[in-house]
Amino acid sequence: MTKIFVAGSTGYIGKNVVKYALDNGFDVVTAKRHSDNKPGQLNKKLKVIKISNNDNNWIADLEKVDVIISCLASRTGEPKDAHLVDYKLNCLLLEKAKALKCSQFILLSAICVQKPRLAFQFEKLAFEEELKKSGLNFSIVRPTAYFKSLSGQIENIKKGKPYVYFGDGQITQCNPISEKDLSLYILSCIKDKTKWRKILPIGGPKQSITPKDIGKILFEIFEVSPKYKSFPTKLLDAIRLLLLIISPFSNWAKNKSELIKIAKYYATESMLIWDEKKECYDANMTPSTGKDTLRDYFYSIKNLDLQLEIDRDSKLY
Ligand SMILES: NC(=O)c1ccc[n+]([C@@H]2O[C@H](COP(=O)([O-])OP(=O)(O)OC[C@H]3O[C@@H](n4cnc5c(N)ncnc54)[C@H](OP(=O)(O)O)[C@@H]3O)[C@@H](O)[C@H]2O)c1
C-alpha cells in the first residue's frame, strides 16, 4: 500500500486528509509541533513524528515514503511567516521528496493565487514554480473557499446580531468546498493520472453564492429574522492607509496592514476561475467535485446545537 507523508496534519484540511487517507487504507506518516493529549497511537497505519520546538531538522530525518502531501500554511498570513512556511518549509520538503525518490508531491495551494496581490500568494506561487521545475511528478490543488471560512458569523446570527458584508453583499461569489470533498479530491491525485503534472483549481458541487446569499441561508436555517449591515470596502482602504503611515515605526502596524490588505482582497475578489479573456470570474469554468453543500453544512451545525441542548436538558432530570 502507498505510504504517504502529510505535512500540516494538524491544520483544518491536513487533519481531514489524514482521516480519509486512513479510511482508504493508506499508510500515513505525520509530524506535529504540539501534542493534542490523545492517548497513544490510535491507528496502526498511522505514525506520528514529534517536532521539537521550531526545529526544521524533522524534515531531514523523514523516513522513506512514496508520496508527500503538503497542507502546510502560514497560520498568520504575515509576510515573514508566509515566506518561512509557504515557501521555505515547502522547499525543504521538496528537497527531501527528491532525496527519497518519492513518486509524487501533492501541494495544497489556493485558487486566489491566479490573481496574486498578497505576500502569501507570491510565496505560494514561488513554491509552485520550484515544484513544477523539480522534475518530480506533482499535483497542485487550488481550492475555492472552505466552509469554515464562510461560517464565522453563525454565533452572531444566533444572538440576533446583523449579518455583515461589504458593498451590496454581491461583489464576490464563490463555489465553496467541504473539507471532506477536498481531502478526497487531494487523495484522488495519487491514482488518477489525469491529475498528474497539473494545476487543479477545484470547488464544491456546482453552485455560486454571494455573501448576501450566505446571510439569507443562515437566517432561514437558524430561524432568525434577517438583519444586514453593510460596510463600504473603502473603509478597509482608510484603515490600511492609517496603518501604513505608522508602519515605518511599528512592526505591529506593518503586519496588521497586510492583514487588512488580505481582508480587502477577499471582500472584493471572487473565489472562482478568472476568465482572462472576458476579464471576469466565471462559476461555470470553475471545476467542481463532491456532494457537500454549504446549506447542508449549516444544517449539520444547527442539528449539533440541538443535540447539545437535548443532552444538556436530559442531564437536568
Ligand atoms: N481558508 C480558505 O477558505 C482557503 C481557501 C482555499 C485555499 N486555502 C489554502 O489552504 C491551505 C491550508 O489551509 P488550512 O485552513 O488547512 O490551514 P491551517 O488550518 O492554518 O493549517 C496550517 C498547517 O500548517 C502547519 N504549520 C504552520 N506553520 C508551521 C511551521 N513553522 N512548522 C510546521 N508546521 C507548520 C500548522 O501546524 P500547527 O498546528 O503546529 O500550527 C498546520 O498543521 C492554505 O494554503 C490556504 O491558503 C484556504
Image: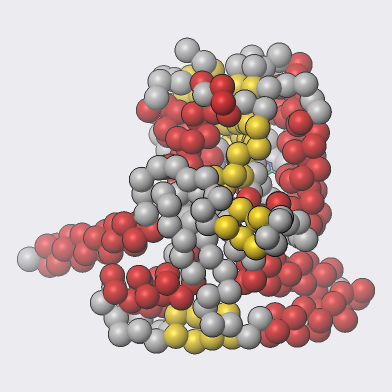
Q: Is residue 82 left or right of residue 202?
A: right
At 37% across and 28% down in the image, what residue appears? 23
Q: Eyeballing the image, is 186 above or below 231?
A: above
Residue that protrudes farthest toward the left in the picture: 317
At 30% across and 85% down in the image, what residue appears? 225
Which residue is more in the foreground, 290 or 10?
Answer: 290
Q: At which x and y percent is residue 314?
A: 12, 62
Q: At which x and y percent is residue 140?
A: 65, 36
Question: In which quadrant will I find the C terminus?
Answer: bottom left
Q: Is residue 33 visible?
A: no
Residue that protrudes farthest toward the front in the picture: 277
Q: Is residue 7 left or right of residue 246?
A: left
Q: Eyeballing the image, is 115 above or below 28?
A: below
Q: Eyeballing the image, is 82 above or below 302?
A: above
Q: Is residue 73 left or right of residue 87?
A: left
Which residue is more in the foreground, 107 or 158?
Answer: 107
Which residue is more in the foreground, 269 or 87?
Answer: 269
Q: Is residue 309 left or right of residue 72?
A: left
Q: At which x and y percent is residue 274?
A: 65, 56
Q: Is residue 174 visible?
A: yes
Residue that protrudes farthest toward the right in the picture: 248
Q: At which x and y percent is residue 194?
A: 56, 26
At 36% across and 45% down in the image, what residue appears? 291
At 58% across and 74% down in the image, what residue appears? 171
Colour mapping used in the image: secondary structure
> Total label count?
0
